[in-house]
Amino acid sequence: MPRNDSLEVGELTDTSYYILLSLMEPKHGYLIMKTIEEMTDHTVVVGPASMYTTIKKLLRAELIKLHDKSDKKKVYVTTEKGVQLVKKEIERKRLMIQHGEEILANKGE
Amino acid sequence: MGKEKYVMSSGLAFFEAKEMERLGKFARRGWFLEKFAFSGFVLRKGKPEEVIYSLDYQSEADDEYFSYFEEAGWKHVCTGAGVMHIFSAAPGTTPIYSEQATIKEKYEKESQSMKKVALPAFLIAIMLVVLLFSSENGFLPTVVGDISEYASYATFIVLIFTGMPYLSYQYKLRKLEKRNV
């Protein structure tokens, strides 16, 4: 079965995108979940199993790194590589929205 | 110490969602999942409560893993075979998987680990059957056939217990992929 890993093709899933955004400032697991919930006005909620597997994946791809391990809780932060990928993703999404808006405007809606 | 009882499982690899619902029904009647047992679960009597259960597969479960669940409101109930973890929570708690990509990973990993055993077992089973037939038709001594026959029973048991879950995970993955289009 081919591994459909979106990170390898340089695309971010919604969960990865929001985790990278919330880790622009160092945070531990629970705070990441809370931050994402507040940031998106409760429209995006990350479950603990998805959270754990995505964190591991982002670490492997070096998009986030361990910032601090004191206090038993692991604190992560987005790396420079992660910031660059987020910027690329924002640009990609901006274009997608632009295309959509243009088409809908021409349709007169 | 409350009363205990054993219930048989119809197989988590095949009926995961049904089995989790069934555990929830037991909890409503005051029987709570306590631990895994051979081919089933041990339940313990308590006060009836509305509880939902979820299963996750994770072979590298560490403190961090369990802390994410706890902080999200999921209580770790028990672990089976080192990789199957069942969690319980109040109805309405955020599901443990919020993203399809990560659900797929859950089954991919399990499917791979089953395949590692099922595939060699399948090849060994074929080899043993060939040896058995060769011996029955006089190409090989009878003793080879006898040994092959008993070895094949053991191999078929291993094959069934890994091959069937493997096929079930593959089926789940295919269903997820179709929904993804």
Image (cartoon, rainbow, N blue to C red):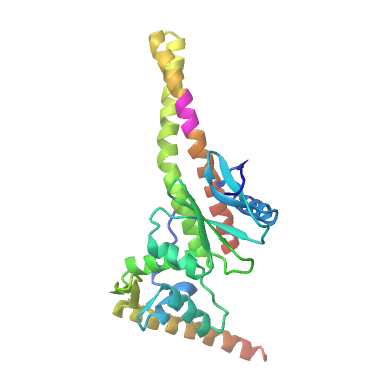
The picture quadrant where one finds residue A84 is bottom left
Q: Is residue A72 above or below residue B19?
A: below
The percent coordinates of residue B89 (x first, y second) are 58, 63
Q: At 43% across and 33% down in the image, what residue appears?
A: B121
Residue, x 45% and y 61% (percent of image)? A4
Regarding residue B139, the answer to whether it shows in the image is: no
- How far across and down, in percent of the image, does residue A41 sit? 56, 84
In the image, residue B52 lies at what x, y percent?
Answer: 62, 60
Residue B128 in picture, x, y percent from top left: 42, 22
Q: Is residue B8 above or below residue A59?
A: above
Please identify the residue farthest to the right as the structure is shown.
B29
Decide whether the magenta segment is chiefly helix, strand or loop.
Answer: helix
Which residue sits at x=40%, y=35%? Answer: B120
Q: Quadrant of the C terminus of chain B?
A: bottom right
Q: Indicate whether residue B65 is drawn in magenta.
A: no
Say which quarter of the image contains residue B21: bottom right
Q: Residue at x 36, y 71 (%)?
A: A73
Toward the viewer: B29 or B128?
Answer: B29
Q: Is residue A40 above or below residue A70?
A: below
The image shows residue B90, relative to residue B85, as above or below, that is below
Magenta span: B153-158
Give left or right: position of A40 versus B25: left
